[in-house]
Image (cartoon, helix red, strand yellow):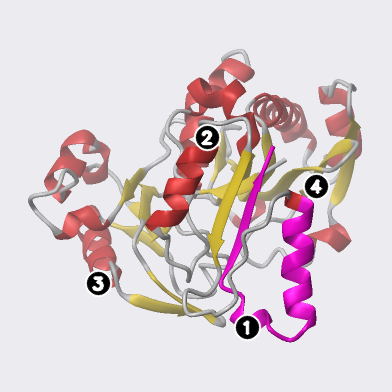
Amino acid sequence: MSVKPIREHTGKALLHRWLGEYSGGKHSYANPGVLVNPDVLDKTKGQTWDAILEANPWLKEQKVVAKPDQLIKRRGKAGLIAVNKTFSEAKDWVMERMCKEQKVETVTGQLTHFLIEPMVPHKQEEEFYICLHSLRYYDEILFYHEGGVDVGDVDAKAERLQIPTGVDLTAGMVTEKLLGKVPMGKQANLASFVLSLYKFYKDLHFAYLEINPLVMLEDNTVVPLDMAAKLDETAGFLCAQRWGEVDWPPPFGRAAYPEEALIRDMDGKTGASLKLTILNDRGRVWTMVAGGGASVVYADTVADYGWGHELANYGEYSG
């Protein structure tokens, strides 16, 4: 399984498109926001601020949230989320940072993609945490009744529900195992949402899906505010039509190389496995190894001999 992270906007766009179907129309996600890229710096390119506004008139009608969408963790604590802004304020905030270098913890990278989405006013007690992830023999759901930026160590305090391969999840299982600390009036609707979310996760071949916070408003509407997700890329032949066009962003702080894109394109057109990741373009040790297992062993051996800092790439061709 080749697990790759996707942008928050991609995950939310998929949820917007499919949640209604997987919930039988009971739940929906109205607005995944809009992704802004460096094209806005050039008026001759396709994406301009005028074009964004024309395609998304809601931007002028309500307050919004703006944040980078580049696989950056803990954006709130890094001061990289603009909350409760007008469209004009959000635009200025994005333009001040577009294509500028930003240090997040120990990593420095260039900010190139931003998500602008509707502001959802809510109370602290309406925030929950949920994470779905896949292991060898089962999927697991982690849930905590006090979500948000200060959720803390969820591995230690979250409720857990394991779903072995071949077992169907039910709303009763969700309520019993996960929602014991949720107010009774919210349990039924939240259980229904979690069940629909798991169907979405499983059928679209996600390998990881974390929402924090997941907000349940007074009218029982459920809204995902912050999302991190990974897809099983090898399921592309099954899910390509349902996924649509997926952008596979590089980790923050590492530029995407055209050579990597070329190999990724070739990999998608063959039954063989072709991989290329540039680790250090100034490195002096380059590998070209047949077989995924052998390529990992060679990379480990280079590091074991003290040359990890000179390892330029991870490469693989097999099958």
Q: Where residue 183 sits in the image (x, y, percent)?
A: 77, 41
Neighbourhood count class around disc 2 (C-alpha, 10 Å): few under 14, some 14–19, many 20 upward = some
Which segment is the magenta one? 293-319
At a point 51% along the width and 68% down the height, the residue shown is 76
Which amino acid, mark 3?
Answer: Glu
Which amino acid, mark 2?
Answer: Gly
State whether residue 161 appears in this view. Answer: yes
Q: Which residue is mark 3?
A: 96
Mark sitting on residue 9:
none
Q: Where residue 242 sits in the image (x, y, percent)?
A: 52, 22
Q: Which residue is mark 2?
A: 268
Q: Which residue is mark 1?
A: 309
Which amino acid, mark 4?
Answer: Leu
Residue 183 vertical position relative to residue 290 in the rendered view, above or below = above
Is 64 on the left-hand or right-hand side of 11? left
User: Dividing the picture into quarters, in which one does residue 82 lie?
Assistant: bottom left
